Image: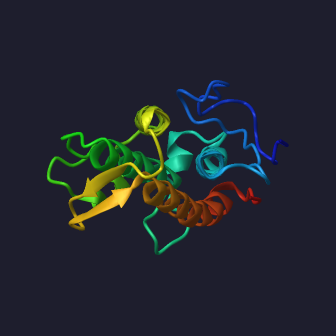
Amino acid sequence: MSTADASTDGNAGDNADGTAGVPTRRIDPPYLGGERETLRAYLDYHRATLAWKCDGLGTEELRKRSMPPSTLTLLSLVRHMAEVERTWFRRVVNGEDIPLRWSAEGDFQVAYDASASTREEAFDAWQTEVAHARRIEAAAESLDVTGHQARWGQDVSLRFVMLHMIHEYARHNGHADFLREGVDGTTGA
């Protein structure tokens, strides 16, 4: 496998064993891998992309609303993705009865308000949720393991969750491209 263009300074917790933290180093997914290996690799690739988009920025830069009139920031994306990881892997797949990280009332929009958040707080939350997600996915006997998405009233497979997470990251990484360029002019995916 090759390493894609990205920083390797490890600001987001570059751990070789993949059990904690979100590396900023992106590894290309396999061209000829099995289904689970490929899904796992694409999800980690997109996680690393978000970390890379935030690499080298402090709290104030990560809070910057760089694309008016949008109030979206890089830090709010990190918080949102912590909430998404928590919801889909811990609450849905693992059936944990836990509240959202930033809203006991179940309001997903609260995570987007990063005005009082710090880089450390947001990244610690995100890294914690990614570590839980990796553990849950690795422990599942197959991609056919199901969980219940209460908001939809539907059972969903781990396969669906992983594909949904890849979609969610890819969409938000597109936002992160523009947000980062607005913060300091840095471009590139």
Q: Is residue 115 visible?
A: no
The location of residue 60, given as percent across then percent down, is 51, 45
Given residues 75 and 20, the one toward you in this image is 20
Query: Extreme right residue here?
Result: 2
Residue 153 position (above or below residue 52): below
Say left or right for 45 vs 85: right
The location of residue 22, given as percent across then percent down, is 58, 36
Residue at 43%, 56% in the rendered image: 161
Residue at 33%, 47% in the rendered image: 93
Query: Extreme left residue here?
Result: 105
The location of residue 50, given as percent across then percent down, is 60, 50
Say left or right for 31 vs 22: right
Count the labels in the image: 0
Residue 49 position (above or below residue 21): below
Residue at 46%, 75% in the rendered image: 69
Residue 70 position (above or below residue 57): below
